[in-house]
Image (cartoon, rainbow, N blue to C red):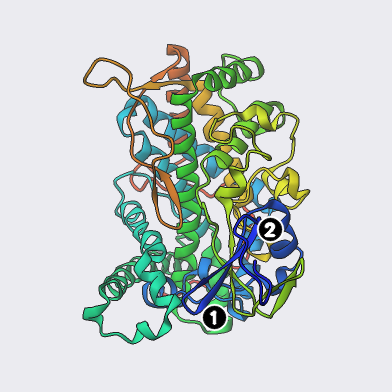
Amino acid sequence: MAERGEKLIISSPVFSLQLGTKTMIVLSSDLAVKDVLDKRSGNYSDRPDMFIGQKVASGDLRLVVMRYADTWRGIHRMIHNILNMKAAVTYTPYQDLENKIMLKGFLEEPQIFLDHVRRYTFSLSTQLIFGYRCPDMNDANLKELFNFANWGELAASGSAQILDLFPILQKLPKWLAPNVKYAESLFKKESAHYLRMWMRAKEGLRNGDSHPCFCNDLLRAQEKENFTDAQASYISGSLLEAGSDTTAATIYGFIQAMLVWPEVLKKAQEEVDRVVGPDRMPTIEDYENLPYIRCCIKESIRWMPTVILGVPHAAIKEDSYNGYVIPAGATIINNVWSIHMDPRRSPNPRTFNPDRFAGDFTTLYQSATGDCTKRDNFVFGAGRRLCQGIHIAERSLFLAISRLAWGFNFSPSIGEDGKPITYNVDDLVGGITVEPRHYTCRIECRSTDKARIIREEAQMSQDLLNSETGQWKESPKGMAFSTWVPEKTEA
């Protein structure tokens, strides 16, 4: 960044941009992220004003971009109670069941594999947050959630940025600022959707029909703090949003990488076959014994970061770093893409090479909070804004990647010329979060025995569910949610 009175030096791993009335500080090195966002997290846990993304399109309620204040801190504590590592290990039954049903989908309808992936991550999230699962990939709630991905594109759009850089433009009439009208429309639809999901969970908790979930603690907090149903619905809804689409996008990216680098898939299959054997699929207990699969997880996140510029932070007070001034209110960007693609950290960065993490036995959380020069990825953020879903995400990715490698072969689709198509791994779509542009491929089960095992495991999972509703007959034991439940209301 430029020192007062001096010229800006863009080549620095830390530099500033003066955009309209705003100062933006870009952190493009692992050390800078550690020094600024981690070690000084107390001053950099705020978010900048986002007129379109937060105020208009989210009613100031979206958790990921919520300003750092008492409301955010209270929600953060609640989320920590259900997403810390000790709690995360208790959710294995949810992950295991949803994953096995996803595998059956790959087996029977491989042409719509992305839908199966999205249902897997979405249903896990709805169980943790609202207490009910998504049994059908045509579920209206699932489809609406991924339609709301438009929020990321809207919040990252140039027209939204202009209104933040020049606040006076926020007073323009709506006919001169069409994105404002669109943002209001999106908020109206999204808030109604989240409110329906929240009220369903709230009613279920009150009448005793719901399973333990995050909304259990949220309802208790609502009754104590007197916040509205609108606030509660957005707290739970934005948590659902954060927990669903990024994990699905990472799995989608991994499958694409296997089409371009088939030797990686072969090596992953060799490890799984050697450790697991032919008579069962991998389980979470195999985590320690499948180091190459764990490297595949790390490389998937590094190679295709779902949040390429992180979520912006804001400086609460004026600060200085390495002799340069960071003004109060400045926006701080964690330049994830630049760090991940730094050839000094990752030689040949656009090559998918899990072996670059050979010998790294850290979990994603251990890596994120350890030596920054060895940190595997910066997608989950930094400081007090580090994503608390990191433990759940890693376990979901482990089950998905290990079992997909165990059960299936992936190969490029055949083009009109009769040759395998070529994939553009740099063609990403989205806004604040990204994923590969839609692609097709051929998916085949590796053997008839594996197909039989997948069907048998899926059927055993289905036997745990109510045949009419698709919900759990009984909650798995040991769930790490609050033991408090509201008193049942009289009929």
Element type where label 2 sits in the image: helix
Q: Position of residue 93 (x, y in %)?
A: 56, 42
The first of marks 1 and 2 along the sequence is: 2
Q: Residue 111 is drawn in which quadrant?
A: top left
Q: Position of residue 37 (x, y in %)?
A: 69, 64
Q: Residue 334 is drawn in which quadrant?
A: bottom right
Quadrant holding the N terminus = bottom right
Is 341 on the left-hand or right-hand side of 201?
right
- Asked if the residues shown at circle 1 and circle 2 are in contact, with their CB atoms under 8 angstroms apart, the answer is no
- The residue carrying pointer 2 sits among few (fewer than 14), some (14 to 19) or many (20 or more) residues within 10 Å by Cα, namely many
Mark-to-mark CA distance, 1 and 2: 39 Å
The residue carrying mark 1 is 223
Q: Amino acid at mark 2?
A: Val
> Eyeballing the image, is 137 above or below 13?
above
Residue 206: tell me if it is visible: no
Disc number at residue 33?
A: 2
